[in-house]
Amino acid sequence: MASIVKFKDEVISEKLKVADSFLSRLIGLMFKKEMEGFDALLIKQCNSIHTFFMRYALDIIFLDKDLRVVKVIENMKPWRATLMYFKATQVLELKSGTLKNRIKKDDQLEVVCIS
């Protein structure tokens, strides 16, 4: 099932990958040279992340259960960790430079199934 992520009428991810199993959430993007075959990773049941063992920077969006933005971190470099954001239930990870200050706290995102 292919999905996109939208903010207002703008697509910010054209190929969303969802990490919702224990193993997919545990591994995430660690050890990967790039996001191959997708351009964003949505980690379910998550309210903090780290970029240990990462090879590139990320734009991070912490979201609540309704996909409302709790916190945005742009250009998070490898070998860093975030705080815990208790209102967040999931995290959207995108390639660094994707957001360009367009998304702020309390903005509403939408995930749309396209197949």
Image (cartoon, rainbow, N blue to C red):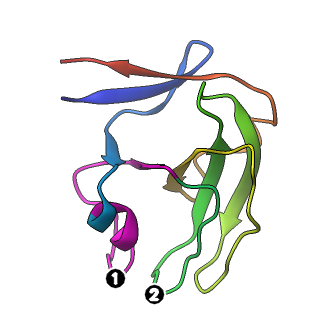
User: Which stretch is magenta?
Assistant: 24-45
Mark 2 and mark 1 in contact (Cβ < 8 Å)? yes
Q: Residue at x 81, y 36 (%)?
A: 105
Question: Quick one: 12 or 70, which is closer to the camera?
Answer: 70
**Quadrant in the picture for the N terminus:** top left
User: Which amino acid, mark 2?
Assistant: Phe
Question: Can you give x and y, in whole percent of width and height, for residue 66 in the image?
Answer: 60, 24
**Disc 1 residue type?**
Phe
> Residue 48's mark?
none
Query: Which percent across, then down, holds residue 80?
Result: 66, 81
- Disc number placed over residue 53 in the picture, else none: 2
- Please give the name of the residue rendered at 62% of the width and 54% of the height, measured from the top-left corner: 60
Examine the rendered structure and indicate whether residue 108 appears above or below residue 61. above
Local SS, label 1: loop
The residue tagged with tag 2: helix, strand or loop? Answer: loop
Residue 34, image quadrant: bottom left
Label count reads 2
Label 1, label 2: how many angstroms apart (C-alpha)?
6 Å
Horizontal arrangement in the rendering, residue 90 relative to residue 83 (left or right): left
Spot occupied by residue 53 in the image (x, y as percentages of width and height): 45, 87
Q: Which mark is residue 31?
A: 1
Quadrant assignment for the C terminus: top left
- Mark 1 burial class by Cα count in 10 Å: few <14, some 14-19, many 20+: few
